[in-house]
Amino acid sequence: NAGVMQNPRHLVRRRGQEARLRCSPMKGHSHVYWYRQLPEEGLKFMVYLQKENIIDESGMPKERFSAEFPKEGPSILRIQQVVRGDSAAYFCASSPSTVGDPGTFGSGTRLTVV
Amino acid sequence: GQQLNQSPQSMFIQEGEDVSMNCTSSSIFNTWLWYKQDPGEGPVLLIALYKAGELTSNGRLTAQFGITRKDSFLNISASIPSDVGIYFCAGQTSGTYKYIFGTGTRLKVLA
């Protein structure tokens, strides 16, 4: 029973490029959360999605960031025209249900913008 | 916005000692969670608390959901070297989906 799979584990992008981060939830989980963690800080909520729906994107920057969770395939967090400040670890968590279930985290994608 | 103050920020302890850390909030939460994060990995859930006053144990770990619903603590008894890591609290308010994370307590155990 595989856990939450995130890839790539490490991603290096030049300023202005696009970054695509993928998250495959655990089998049977239809809810995905994305969090960002800066060095020496806690995790900051970005977005909560169910299959084909964005439920809460209150933590997403208004520009350059987008997320999707299609009917088939992994959830994707997309960052366009990356800047140095986007360098961080991005974690997703998946859950089988709604409010009250904390979900299971993946190992994260560490994005470095050079 | 909502903030979680976690203390202490870091602590060095001797193996075998008990550890206590806490988290306070400016808002009322209906769920408190405690996670441990090892370097290069995602957080792993240790204990989940869903009721004010609830006291829950998981092996050598014990956590409580404060009566005011604005705080929680985590105790680790008889610490061992593998307890090293960063411990995060996280809280969720009623009717929302997101969890607010604390800034973490970095624990180092001296053998």
Image (tube, helix red, strand yellow):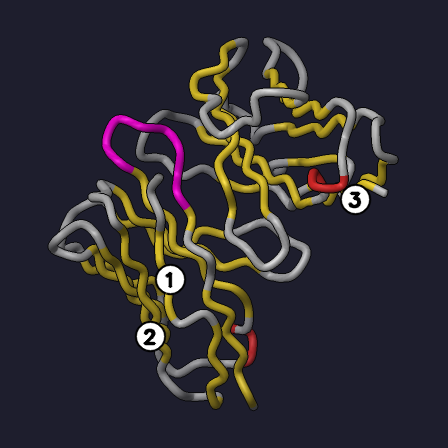
Residue stretch rendered in magenta on the structure: B93-100
Secondary structure category for the residue under label 2 = strand
Q: Earlier in the sequence, mark 1 or mark 2?
A: 1
Quarter containing the C terminus of chain A = top right
Q: Position of residue B102 (x, y in %)?
A: 41, 54
Question: Residue at image x 78%, y 25%?
Answer: A81
Parent chain of label 1: B
Secondary structure category for the residue under label 3 = strand
Q: Are marks 3 and 1 on the same chain?
A: no
Between the residue at mark 3 and the residue at mark 1, the CA separation in whole angstroms equals 28 Å
Amino acid type, residue under disc 3 in the picture? Thr
Q: Residues within 10 Å of mark 1 (few under 14, many from 20)?
A: many
Q: Is residue A73 left or right of residue B99?
A: right
Between the residue at mark 1 and the residue at mark 2, the CA separation in whole angstroms equals 11 Å
Label 2 sits on residue: B20
State whether residue B40 is above or below residue A30. Answer: below
Label 1 sits on residue: B6
Q: Is residue B95 magenta?
A: yes
Parent chain of label 3: A
Parent chain of label 2: B
Q: Is residue A93 magenta?
A: no
Q: Which of the two residues, A36 or A68, is positioned nearer the viewer here?
A: A36
Q: Position of residue B3 (x, y in %)?
A: 35, 48
Question: Residue at image x 55%, y 68%?
Answer: B85
Q: Position of residue A58 (x, y in %)?
A: 45, 25
Q: Is residue A50 left or right of residue B39?
A: left
Label 3 sits on residue: A112
Amino acid type, residue under disc 2 in the picture? Ser
State whether residue A61 is above or below residue A107. Answer: above
